Amino acid sequence: MTEILGFRRADGQIGIRNRLLVLFTVVCAEEVSRRIAYQLDDAFIAGWRDCTSNATARRKMLRLAANPNIGAVLVLSLGCESTDSAGLAEEIRAMGKPADFISVQAAGGTRSAVALGVEKGRALQALPVERAPMTVADLIVGVECGGSDTTSGIAANPALGLAADRVVNAGGTVIFEETNELLGCEALLARQAATPTVAAEALAAIQIARDWGARTNQRAISSGNIEGGLTTIEEKSLGAVCKAGSTPLVGVLHGGRWERPTRPGLHLLAPHYVDADGWTGGGTISDPNGVTELAACGAHLVVFTTGRGSVTGSGVAPVLKVCGNPETYARMSENMDINAGAIVTGEKTLREIGDEIYTAILATAAGRLTKAEELEHFEFHI
Amino acid sequence: MSDYATSPDMIVLHPADNVATALKNLAAGGPASLAGPEGRLQPLALRDQIKLGHKAALRNISKGELAIKHGVPFGRATSDIAVGEHVHIQNIASLSQETDLMPRDDRHD
């Protein structure tokens, strides 16, 4: 059994990393933020680029700051953007998380802001943190796919589903999203739901994705899918949703609020095309955004399946890559943690790769860096 | 443990499935080697050519019966399907109604 020694936070959560989040509140402060993070260990940047303030962006930044892998936050403002940056730092401190604030204008420009940022960052990182033992039951694991191909539905995703079942059966939590890939799976999700309320919430989430598809003319199943061998929309969707496993769906998380699951088990994160700020429309679908949303819901790590290849990582939640295409794996092995292509070549069974993924989840939680972390792929999308 | 001298021709994803998915382009006739979730399964004699990503019936599927992949129904047989036969849109209908999401240029009405 891998021993996991995490980092206890003021709110009682335990993280598997102890990172400093350098959080910029306008693109004008992004470059200074990057230079600060470069000079510090275990530091990375994320932020909101627009000069206007935005309630959804603010909520997402707060939810990322709340992730237990974040030890402290350094908020970087230019000084004249609309977002209340000092107030954001204050709100993060109010959550019990150490935070500090820098205005580039007040600091006196680039060099002095970078020097001040490095000094404040080191001070935040020097704060004592209690180590605490963790088990799988304490873990929240996000599952996601991107750059999919024919192998995704027959190798990487089914294998990840077996690993997801092991996490939940050990008392842990799994979150999946990509609701637009659940079309045609309404009956399945309703059956998998633990209660009628959860079933109704899952169906409502799928309806949001259906409406979005209608507005944006997104096709559910294309003639190319059919030529490739997919017969029905539910077969296509099953190839994606099987990565969440087969345990009961115990909760649906509201898209746009990105709340942490309040009980263990399998959760669906609903899409956030619509929220209090109105219709957010396109621009919300990308691999970095999916991973960021899972991290905002408190995911300790994300297991990401791909066939064509993906390089996406996250500074908040380590991303484990599972590649189902043996040719892609050979070509992009520096980005891939697990070769699910071995299922296709017959070297390993689905069950064996499922077990490999589960073992990798434990090793990552225990501190082993993923390929994306080694490469410092710290993408984000606010 | 997996025990193939060469890579398998098809994969069965769940013990409850009644279809196998081709991992390569396969000609009609020859027995296709099958990977199961936990190891090798009995080879399947193919009645049709099965291209990569396409499916063949693992057993006879009667008209009206559910087609199962990932352990879950993905459609219903619209005609009797013999073991080893190509399983696709010519003999399977969706259980859901998704045509409202098809873009105009993809509609065939």
Image: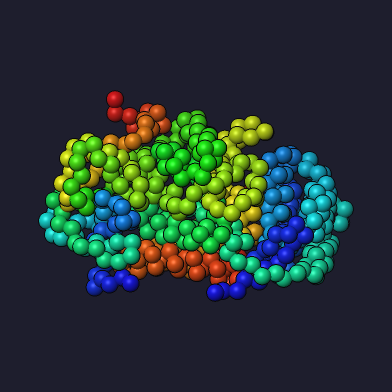
Left or right, residue A155 beside residue A252 = left
Q: Relative to residue A371, is residue A165 depicted above or below?
A: above
Where does the image place residue B30, in percent across and percent down from the top left?
A: 13, 59
Q: Residue furthest left?
A: B29
Q: Quadrant of the C terminus of chain B?
A: top left
Where does the image place residue A252, in percent across and percent down from the top left?
A: 57, 43
The number of discs equals 0
Where does the image place residue A295, in percent across and percent down from the top left?
A: 62, 54
What residue lies at 86% left-to-right and 57% top-to-bottom?
A107
Residue A228 vs residue A164, the one in the foreground: A164
Where does the image place residue B100, in percent across and percent down from the top left?
A: 40, 28
Residue B63 vs residue B53, the one in the foreground: B63
Residue A88 shows in this picture:
yes
Q: Relative to residue B8, is residue A191 depicted above or below?
A: above
State the image quarter where residue B62 is shown.
Answer: top left
What residue lies at 52% left-to-right and 57% top-to-bottom?
A168
State the image quarter where residue A50 is shown.
Answer: top right
In this figure, which colouring scheme has been used for the structure?
rainbow
Left or right, residue A175 beside residue A382 = left
What residue lies at 54% left-to-right and 74% top-to-bottom?
A1
Q: Residue furthest top?
A: B109
Q: Quadrant of the N terminus of chain B?
A: bottom left
Residue A307 shows in this picture:
no
What residue lies at 24% left-to-right and 73% top-to-bottom?
B5
Residue A216 vs residue A210, the one in the foreground: A210
